[in-house]
Image (cartoon, grey):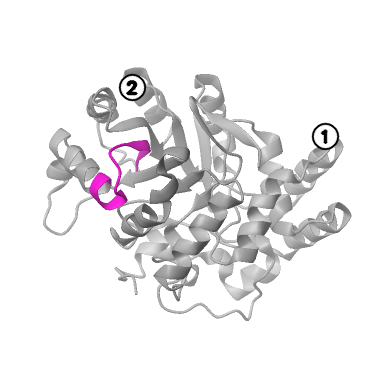
Amino acid sequence: MKYRKLRDLEVSAVGMGCMGFSHGYGALPPEEDAIKMIRYAYEKGCTFFDTAENYGPFVNEELVGKAVKPFRDKIILATKFSPFTQPTQTAKEKLSREGIREAVEGSLKRLQTDYIDLYYEHRVPLDSNVEDVAGWIGELIQEGKIRGWGQSQSTEEQIRKAHAVTPLTAIQSEYSMMERMFEKDVIPACKELNIGFVPFSPLASGFLSGKYNKNTQYKGDDVRRAITRFIPENVEKNQPLLDMLNDIANTKNSTPAQISLAWMLHKYDFLSPIPGMRKFERIDENLGAADVELTQSEFENIEKELDKITIYGNRTDEDIQKMGYVRAQ
């Protein structure tokens, strides 16, 4: 495994997004199997594991805490607090010094640890005072409860304002060959300010693996029911992207998923994607992407082809929220 820096945190070039072990992608693996897979990823060189209080909610942090306990001090553990309310809270209660402190204490308990390496604000409301949040987070850093912090899906303006108060370690936002909106402003700002960038959904919820087609059915607690790029007609329209990936993968003795990850790893050296992986073979495949090296010519060719391809459909929080609240099974 290769490693890189998110500001001052050293992480494996490819991390593991653990959300799917508790919700979001249909039928869940048994907890025992999920723990085995998280530990297998560590054995394969992964040192960067991502969870959140909202995943489940809460049960994913408990699962990850159990899984990483034997090697807790050898990894970077990331989790997130939601700035939005639970049913018994008001917005003021949650997005406050006391609310964030309560959230940290809850995560620490569920994760069975006394510190969090990377603590994100899980979405940043447009009307919130990011400077206040940064100040409260700074207090937690001084107390040693967290080592670094970040934001998710934030704007360049929010990043700059928060960073000026308490320097950000990383920004976690959606980024893949199918969603490149942050290349315009957020990612350049991260580079300028020495902030790491952590793409979630780097394989576009699995679309870029090439393992799904227009006839694939998504059931129950599977966000792909609401993600418009999985609508059958959009699957067909997006086939040129998969064709390109397959062509390159064949020449590199790799897979479309590996080329998708290798592309972003080549493009930015301050980036570490966190694909979900719920099968041992997917762990081998995704972590193996760190060893797939593109030449500059190959990378430039991909960039040129991407500029020619129109992407149909996207992934939005608003669409996913239409599914309603689904409990982990």
Amino acid type at image mark 1: Gln
- Up/down of 19 relative to 172, above or below: below
The structure residue drawn at horizontal position 27% and vertical position 29%, both measured from the top left corner, is: 137
Q: Nearer the viewer, residue 140 or 237?
A: 140
Q: Are marks 2 and 1 in contact (CB under 8 Å)?
A: no
Quadrant location of residue 5? top right
The structure residue drawn at horizontal position 52% and vertical position 43%, both measured from the top left corner, is: 47
Quarter of the image with the N terminus is top right
Q: Position of residue 141 (x, y in %)?
A: 29, 26
Q: Give the range drawn in magenta.
A: 108-122
For residue 272, the mark is none
- Give SS at disc 2: loop
Q: Is 132 placed left or right of 11 in the picture?
A: left
For residue 166, the mark is 2
For residue 296, the mark is 1
Q: Is 264 placed left or right of 101 in the picture?
A: right
Q: Nearer the viewer, residue 244 or 185?
A: 244
- Up/down of 4 relative to 122, above or below: above
The structure residue drawn at horizontal position 36% and vertical position 39%, both measured from the top left corner, is: 120
**Which mark sits nearer the N-terminus, 2 or 1?**
2
Q: Which of 153 and 237 is in front in this view?
A: 153
Q: Is residue 94 magenta?
A: no
Measured in 3D between alpha carbons, the distance from the residue under mark 2 to the one under mark 1, in whole angstroms, is 36 Å
- Give SS at disc 1: helix
Amino acid type at image mark 2: Thr
Q: How many numbered marks appear?
A: 2
* Residue density around tag 2, few if under 14, some if 14–19, many if 20 or more, within 10 Å: many
Q: Does the magenta stretch include residue 115?
A: yes
User: Outermost residue toward the right?
Assistant: 251
Q: Is 239 placed left or right of 88 in the picture?
A: right
Q: Which of 111 and 217 is in front in this view?
A: 111
Q: Is 43 placed left or right of 220 in the picture?
A: right
